[in-house]
Image (tube, rainbow, N blue to C red):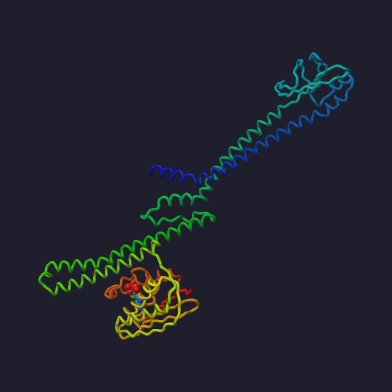
Amino acid sequence: MKARSKDTTKKLNSSLASRISSIYTKMFVTWLAISLVAIFLFVLGVTAYSIYYESKPSLEAIDRQSSLEGLIDKVNSMNEAGVVLSGSQGEILASSFRYDDLEPLIFDYFNIRVINSRLYFLYKRQLTVENIVLGLIVYNDITVLIFETIVIGALAILLFGVSTLTIHLRGSYLTRKAFGVLDELTEKANNISSQNLNLRLNVNDSTDELIEIALTFNRMMDRIEKAYEKQNQFVSDASHELRTPISVIQGYARMLDRWGKEDKEILQESIQAIKKESENMQDLVDKLLFIARNDKDTLVLVKNRFSMSELVEELVRETILLETGHKIESHVEPEIMLHGDRDRIKQALRIFVDNAIKYTEPGQTITIWLNVEDDYAVVTVRDTGIGIPEEHLPNIFDRFFRVDSSRERDKGGHGLGLSIARIIVLRHGGRIKVASKPGEGTRFKIYFPVE
Ligand code: ADP
C-alpha cells in the first residue's frame, strides 16, 4: 500500500509541469500541422490552376472551330499548349505537341506519362466536328509542379520538425520554470512530517501568478509549525509543572517511610504537605483538562439569562469572606442582565480577583466594579499591588507564563489562570483590557456583550 502510494506520488511529481508542457506542445503541433497542410494544398492548387489557365485560351479557340480542316489547322499551328487531336481509332490527326515519337493514345479520361525525361499529365476530351467523334488530348507538363511539390513538402516537413523540437524544448523549459513551484509543492507536501515542519517553497523561482500559491503554502507551514511548537511547549510545560508536586510527594513518602512511623511531628508535616501538593496537582490537572477541552472544541458552555449584577455582588461577598487582609471596594450597577454560562463567567472573574489578592500586599485596596459601557457589561478589577512590567503585558495570557516563575510558584500559580479566563471571555464574545505599572498596581477591564 505504501509502495503504491509512493508510485502515485512519483507519477504526480513528474507529470504536473511536463503534462502542461505536453498539452501546449500538442496544441502547437496540431495547429502547425494544419497550417502547413493548408499552405501546401494552397500552393499546389495555385500551381495547378496556373497550368490549366495557360492552356485555357487555346482550348477555347479549338472549341470555336466548326470544321475538321479548320480544327486540324488550328491544332497544328498552336504554340502555347501541347494538344493532340486523335481520330476515332486513336490515330493522330494533328498535334501541337512537338515530339516525334508520339504514339496513338487510347484512354478514357486522364493519364500520366514520362516523355523525354519530363512528366506530363494527360487528359482527354471528346469533340464532335462534322459528325465525327474526335479525341482531344491535352498534355500538361507537370514536371515543375511535382518538383515544387516535393521541395515545398520537404521544407514543410523540415519546418514542422524544427518547430516541434524547438517548441518542445523551449516549452518544457518555460513550463518547468513557470509551474515548477507546483511540482515542488507536491513533493514538499508529500514529504511533510512532524520532523520537518520547517520545509518552505522557494518563492524566488515562482512566476508572478504562482508566487501567491507559494506564499500561501509557506504561510500555512508557518502557522502549522508555530501551532506544533506551541503544542510541544504546552506538553513539556505541563509535564514540568507536574514534576514538582510529584517529587515533593515522593520526598515526603520517603521521609514517612524512614522516620514517620515513630515521629508524630514528621507524620503530621508529611500528611499536610502531601495533601497540599495533591490538591495542587488536582488544580493543575483540572486547568489542563479545561484548556485541552477548549483546544479540542469540546468545551460546552451552558448559556442562560442571568443577572450579572447579582453575580458580581456574590463575588464581592465571597472575596470579603476570604479575610485576606485586603480592603475590598466595590461598585455594582444594578439590573445588568447577561446571556452566558454563569458558572464559567464567575470562574473567570475569580481568576482576576484571586490574582489581585495574590499580587497585592495585605492592607492594600482591591476594587471590583461593574458598569455598562456601549452595550458591554464591564467588570473592572483593580489592585494597588506589584504591577506587571510593560514588556510582559503581551504575554500574561500565554499558557504557563509567569512574570517571575520562582517567586510566583510559591504563591501557587501555574501561569494558566489568565489563559483560562481569556478562553471564557472570548467564548462569550467579550474582550479584556489590561493596564499596569510596576509598584503602582494593575487594572483589568473585562467586557461582556449585554443582550
Ligand atoms: P498564575 O496562576 O501564575 O497567577 P496567571 O495566568 O493568572 O497565572 O497570571 C500570569 C502572570 O501574570 C502571573 O504569574 C503574574 O506574574 C502576572 N499577573 C497576573 N495578574 C496580576 C496582578 N493582578 N498583578 C501582578 N501580576 C499579575
Residue at 39% across, 56% down:
197
Image location of residue 319, percent across then percent down: 33, 80
* For residue 74, above or below residue 343: above
Asked whether 260 or 14 is in front, the reply is 260
Image quadrant of residue 338? bottom left
In this image, 247 relative to 340: left or right? left
* For residue 28, above or below residue 47: below
* For residue 128, above or below residue 295: above
Image quadrant of residue 92? top right
Q: How many tags in the picture?
A: 0
Image location of residue 394, percent across then percent down: 40, 72
Query: In which quadrant is the N terminus drawn?
Result: top left
Tell me the quadrant of ligand 1. bottom left
Image location of residue 129, percent across then percent down: 87, 19
In this image, 326 relative to 126: left or right? left
Asked whether 137 or 314 is in front, the reply is 314
* For residue 394, above or below residue 38: below
Asked whether 229 or 140 is in front, the reply is 229
Q: Residue furthest left?
A: 262
Asked whether residue 430 is in view, the answer is no
Image location of residue 65, percent across then percent down: 88, 23
